């Protein structure tokens, strides 16, 4: 993705050319059977001085929400289903900003919680000593 200096501004919105470029990237990935995609979450490759914590949070929220909307829209396009979507953080990102972005991600995207089954004693073994009417069988 090629962008200009307008991305350094804090004033971009969902109609900005770079955000619409993300939509086109997702659309192309869908139509060309690409199943794994990596996107720069802040639309920048390196941290700069103007990228404050607030700036990073606002930019990431915009990107996350727009990408989520594009993915919902993408479901009606047909083609391949995106299996892996990775968000890349810029080189030099602070631990605080990274933590904020990691916390924001599951609040915007639905994250499935794994269902863990634990083995338990078999009920059929306990019930094998009872007859159909519930009384114990004679041994």
Image (spheres, grey):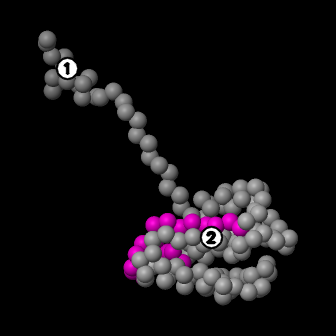
Q: Is residue 94 visible?
A: yes
- What residue appears at the point 75 percent right and 82 percent down from the top-left corner? 7
Residue placed under numbered mark 1 in the picture: 129
Local secondary structure at mark 1: loop
Q: Residues within 10 Å of mark 1 (few under 14, many from 20)?
A: some
SS for tag 2? helix
First-in-chain label (1 vs 2): 2
Q: Is residue 10 above or below residue 83?
A: below
Kindly identify the residue that appears in the image at 15 percent across and 23 percent down: 131
Q: Which residue of the protein is positioned furthest toward the top in this rendering?
A: 139
Residue range corresponding to the magenta coloring: 70-90
Q: Is residue 75 something one can see in this rendering? A: no
Tell me what residue is drawn at x 20 percent, y 20 percent. 129
Residue 60 is a magenta residue: no
Asked whether the residues under the numbered discs 1 and 2 touch, taking CB atoms below 8 Å apart as contact, a structural biologist would say: no
Residue beneath the point at 64% across and 67% down: 88
Residue 21 location, x and y as percent? 60, 85
Percent of width and height locating residue 9: 79, 81
- State the image coordinates of residue 132 (x, y, percent, origin top left): 15, 27
- Give left or right: position of 114 versus 58: left
Determine which residue is flagged by label 2.
Answer: 64
**Foreground tag (1 vs 2):** 2
Near-viewer residue (129 or 31): 31
Looking at the image, residue 28 lies above or below residue 126: below
Q: Quadrant of the N terminus?
A: bottom right
Is 113 on the left-hand or right-hand side of 96?
A: left
Q: Specify the quadrant of the image occupied by residue 49.
A: bottom right
Tell whether position 82 is magenta: yes
Badge 2, how many Cα within 10 Å: few under 14, some, many 20+?
some
């Amino acid at each position: 993705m090629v962008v200009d200096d307008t991305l350094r501004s804090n004033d971009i919105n969902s109609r900005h050319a770079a955000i619409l470029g993300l939509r086109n990237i997702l659309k192309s990935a869908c139509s060309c059977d690409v199943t794994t995609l990596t996107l720069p979450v802040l639309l920048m490759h390196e941290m700069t001085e103007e990228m404050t914590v607030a700036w990073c949070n606002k930019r990431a929220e915009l990107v996350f929400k727009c990408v989520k909307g594009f993915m919902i829209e993408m479901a009606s396009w047909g083609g391949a289903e995106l299996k892996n979507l990775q968000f890349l953080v810029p080189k030099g990102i602070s631990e605080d900003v990274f933590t904020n972005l990691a916390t924001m991600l599951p609040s915007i995207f639905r994250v499935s919680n794994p269902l863990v089954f634990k083995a338990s004693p078999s009920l059929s073994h306990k019930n094998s000593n009872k007859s159909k009417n519930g009384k114990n069988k004679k041994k």
